Amino acid sequence: MITSEAAPFAKTGGLADVLGALPPALAKLGEEVAVVMPRYASIPLHGSTRISDGMRLSVGPNAFTAGIDQVEREGVRYLFVDCPPLYGRAGIYGEEGIAAYPDNHIRFALLNQAALEIGRSIFRPNIFHAHDWPGGLLAPYLRENHGSDPDFAGAKTVITIHNLGYQGNFPAASLSDLGISPALFHPNGLEFWGELSFLKAGIVWSDAITTVSPTYAREIQTPEYGAGLDGVLRDRAAKITGILNGVDYVEWSPDIDPYSKFPYSAQDLSGKRLAKRALMEEVGLPQNEARPLIGIVSRFAGQKGFDLLEEIVPELAAMDLAMVVLGSGEAPIEAMFRAMAKAHPEKFAVEVGYDEGLAHRIEAGADMFLMPSRYEPCGLSQLYSLRYATVPIVRATGGLEDTVDELTGFKFIEYTPEALLEAIREALVAWSDRPGWLERMRRGMAKDFSWDAAAVQYQRLYRSL
């Protein structure tokens, strides 16, 4: 597997969670799995072993020397490409004051070249499985630059699209840095609206394409969700499979959650009431346990649907509910939430930033969880919420559509403030029926979205190749 991030080593989002959980789940099924990723300056690799020194790599005219460090974890070999000129920086894709490093095309092209060299000399795979745009050049490098190399005879390629909104697009002039034939730069190849697209490269050259939920696999083949690549994806519809992401229930389970002082289970939900009381006290909300508490833990991004929420703030403020929000991201969304909390401190508590412990306590203490996403490839928070008996209110898109049903949560279809408000009202009405609400909570807790099922589907795909 080729990735830019994997938990617990480096993380900016859900991609890292997948690469921390799927490889061990495959190893449990008897597969041999190695994960190749950069060794960023931020990764303290305790207990690592240097298994290769002086690996010579080239990206077009650029020559590099890299070391390979290994960490074994849960039956998986994590192989880190140590190239300080490219990865010895504070950030993963960029840092404060630098939206994105200007040489990211070289940084992640090198990752793909390193994965191929590792596949030749350290770990001989049947499958190269790339994740998102940072792994997008693996397939064209393999097919176009090493197509007749006996070391890679029979090797197949898979690319997983975790979020089509991030495509790894670079100026056409960057092609000369990458060691790829200019003849491949055309609308049926690497070219995307005059630029070079890493993700499109992976889509065009890979033997199989997966997404992180079945509904998202269908959605990205439409103009509304295809981010300009819907035609390319429709042409390859037979290669596309939607496999729903899983959840690590060791990390996210209310009966063993180390961040909450009040464990509970479907058999004994009394701890949830205590968790709610403690959460309201922690975030400074009035201690009104009869009032439903809605939680939000999210990146503050346009994808997440908070423009709908902004339109209905007056209506929410007039309802008998409270809301606790944790997240950070785009400045206008941060400002919106801060304004809500300032205008209605008795109703809205907002923490800008990220706090892993508070995220867990919101899942444990909230009664409902809100995800009004414009699009959502899979989503993990709704899966956590189901296990924590925190009833999801979601837009019916992507993985939200696949994982929440009318027996476990509430969904709205139209991307409008009115549809969102109606879903919240429906949830509040259901909340007043306590026996029915308790049954809804328990049905959600009974759902199993562990990685075991996803790993079996990936294994089936690999075997089919």
Image (tube, rainbow, N blue to C red):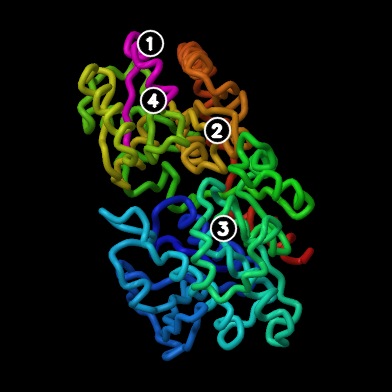
Marked residue nearer the N-terminal end (2 or 1): 1
Please state, as top left, top right, bottom left or bottom right, where the N terminus lies in the image: bottom right
Q: How far, Cα to Cα, is label 3 from label 4?
A: 39 Å
Q: How far, Cα to Cα, is label 3 from label 2?
A: 40 Å
Q: How far, Cα to Cα, is label 1 from label 4?
A: 15 Å
Q: How far, Cα to Cα, is label 2 from label 4?
A: 16 Å
Out of 169 and 150, give the one closest to the viewer: 169
Tell me if 276 is positioned left or right of 222 in this view.
Answer: left
Q: Residues within 10 Å of mark 4 (few under 14, many from 20)?
A: many
Tag 4 residue: 294
Q: Position of residue 353 (x, y in %)?
A: 27, 42
Tell me if 239 is positioned left or right of 49 in this view.
Answer: right
Q: Amino acid at mark 1?
A: Glu
Tell me if 287 is positioned left or right of 35 in this view.
Answer: left
Frontmost of labels 2 and 1 is 1
Residue drawn at point x = 33 percent, y = 49 percent: 258
Q: Secondary structure at mark 1?
A: helix
Q: Are marks 3 and 2 in contact (CB under 8 Å)?
A: no
